Image (tube, rainbow, N blue to C red):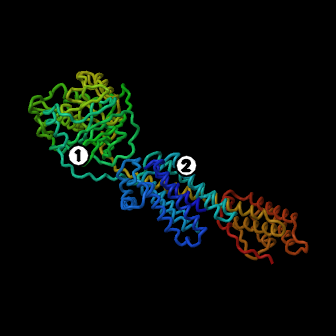
Amino acid sequence: MAALLLLATGLAGLLFAPVFGMGALLLPLVTVLLVCFAVTEVSLRVAALRPWRPVLMLVLGLLALGELEFGPGLPDAAMLRGLLDGVTRSWQLTLQSTWPARADAELFLFVPLAVLFAAVLAIELSRLPAVALLPGLAVAGLSQAYLALSGPVATAAGLAYVVVAGTLLAVTRRRESRLVLLLPTVVLAVAVSAGGTAVDQGVRPSLALEHETAPVPPLRVDNPLDEVADRLTRPGEPVFGYTGTAGTDRWRIAVLTDFDGAGWRANGDYLRLGATLGTATRHARITVPAGGGPWLPSQPLLATVAGADPLVDPATGTLLLPGRRGPVEYELGWREPAVAPDTLLDAGIDASAVSGGVGQVPPGVAELARTATGGLRPSFRAALVLERYLAENYRQATGPVLPTGSGWAQLSGFLFTTRAGTSEQFATAYVALARLIGIPARVAVGFRTPPGGPGPVTVHNGDSFAWPEVAVAGVGWVPLDPTGGASRGTAAAAGALARVTAQAREALPPSQRLRDPEVPMDEHATTGPSEPETPWIGTLLTWLGIGVASVLAFVAVAIPGRRAVRTARRRRRTGSAAVIAAWMEARDVLRAHDIVVSRGATARELARRLPSTVDSSVAEGLEWLARQVDITLWSPYGADDRTAAQAWSAVRAIRKGFTEASFRTRLRAAFALGSLREPGLVTE
């Protein structure tokens, strides 16, 4: 029994696999369970250890975890601090990480510790097996609060747990009640796991714990957007280097979304970078020298980072390494979206994307935005038209003194007076104009990729660059270049998305032949704000429905199953006991059909008191059964197997007599709870 209890608790701990991965959890959990099992077995053989069993399990389990996670050796202060952090901090640090999280002791140690405590409680409550399962169920509930299983995995996990728990309950019950207990448990597990699959469908439930933003210390550095002009005045200074077939035309270090009219700010929710954010299709080895800000060169669809432990904004791929002083070398992995070349030009915008505001717009800017896009409605075609307008009507500033600033005061001068600026003014002006006509856009800051082969490439200050990105439905954020650099071929060695964007740019019709693409308008853009959604109501109603269905399924199996087991037990009796069992079965059948059976009534009395609506074969069966009871009670020879067989034949006749009743009556009789009671039987 102890092994089954520990196995059920361990299965609950393995439900954290979507958070940490199965490989990281398996060894610590097995270690904890083996220690608990060994202590339990030794305590059974050494009576003096039984009062100390929970203490021994806790102490030895903690020592085993300490040796496993913090290295072999005698317990020291570092091990004790690590175990204490596992209880107090690791669960919260995991919420601050992307999932699956890294298998670091400071993050995942709370899982084996929770399993250890649950295992100790389960062993100490083993006299009550149903209660002993509760600590493991609490661990399972905690795992689902972090990241709920869904789909076939949820069904398989539910069935695996119920097989272990059902076996435990079955082996600790009387033989006659094992089947009755196991069958409804299986039905309930299938109903709950299937219901959870239907509700979730691979989407994280609304009741699950949310990621917590990792605390970021105050960054005493300049906004990277404000550094663009200064970097361009020192073009030969190296910034970072990389090796590998990167296949990208730009490297980002920051994404800015908030604009209040005076300046631009990043609004990222940084998390601790977990094991992976997806499958990487491209890789590069990046070396950043000492100095500079906390940002690390990255890519939008970031997948992996090896060699550094930065914070990440999963929505933008931005990497942040607070407190960086020395050089950093790491391997970056990312992926690219799959985009069909012939669909991007006519794609719509993603109106659900969060971009930002525009502050207090100066006069004439909104009219300029409509003029620049030719009156087209919000779409990727309109985004390309705006890009072409800025590239054709504005020029890049040159000289030892370059314009700086990206508030409306500087952008108004750029748009209406000087018509010259760096990529800082081009990108921010583009984003502001795009937002005014309903295109979600944001500013990215980083570096262009300089010409070079697959060997080592060095990026310099002269490659400093800011660009806009627009949200495209079905694609994501697509980078553009209103300075005209992309149209001049600087993206020739870029990735797939940049090449598809270049093809859409080349296919864009001349200004005189522009028209809106044949795509439906986005409902959110035309119908205005809708009523706030309340998804929790639907979730609550769904779970209530699942609960009701589970109860009905339990009743549908438990009551007929209990009767079947009871009848089978009675049929196994022989001689006089078999006749008495047949008489008890007949009484149960009558009670199930709402016929009053008093404590001292005989079979003949019941036959005479039957309602007139009952078929006559019921009365005949009772009369025949009465004869067999008389033989059993009064014959000097007693009842033999033939008498028992005739008594059960009478019971079958009674059952058959009730088959003529209405369907409603038979249905009520099939699930009558009162028929499960076994009142005392008077045979005198």
Q: Quadrant of the N terminus?
A: bottom right
Number of numbered discs on residues: 2
Q: Residue at x 50, y 48 (%)?
A: 197
Real-space CA distance between mark 1 and mark 2, rounded to the nearest whole angstrom = 49 Å
Task: State if disc 2 and disc 1 touch (CB < 8 Å).
Answer: no
Query: Quick one: SS at disc 2?
Result: helix
Q: Residue furthest right?
A: 636
Where is residue 574 shown, x and y percent of the image?
82, 66
**Which of 418 and 280 lies nearest the eye of the viewer?**
280
Look at the image and tell me in which quarter the C terminus lies: bottom right
Above or below, comparing residue 50 to residue 209 in the picture = below
Q: Residues within 10 Å of mark 2 (few under 14, many from 20)?
A: some
Residue beneath label 2, please? Answer: 156
Q: Residue 508's x, y, as percent?
A: 28, 23
In-front residue for pair 484/285? 285
Quadrant of the image occupied by residue 123 = bottom right
Q: Earlier in the sequence, mark 1 or mark 2?
A: 2
Q: Is residue 185 above or below residue 322?
A: below
Q: Residue furthest front?
A: 73
Residue 658 is tagged as none
The amino acid at mark 2 is Ala
On the image, the x and y values in percent for residue 278 come to: 40, 40
What's under tag 1, amino acid-wise?
Arg
Numbered tag placed on residue 325 in the rendering: 1
Q: Residues within 10 Å of mark 1 (few under 14, many from 20)?
A: few
Per the image, label 1 sits on a secondary structure element best described as: loop
Asked whether residue 59 is in view, the answer is yes
Position of residue 129 relative to residue 486, above or below, is below
- Residue at 41% across / 61% down in the picture? 75
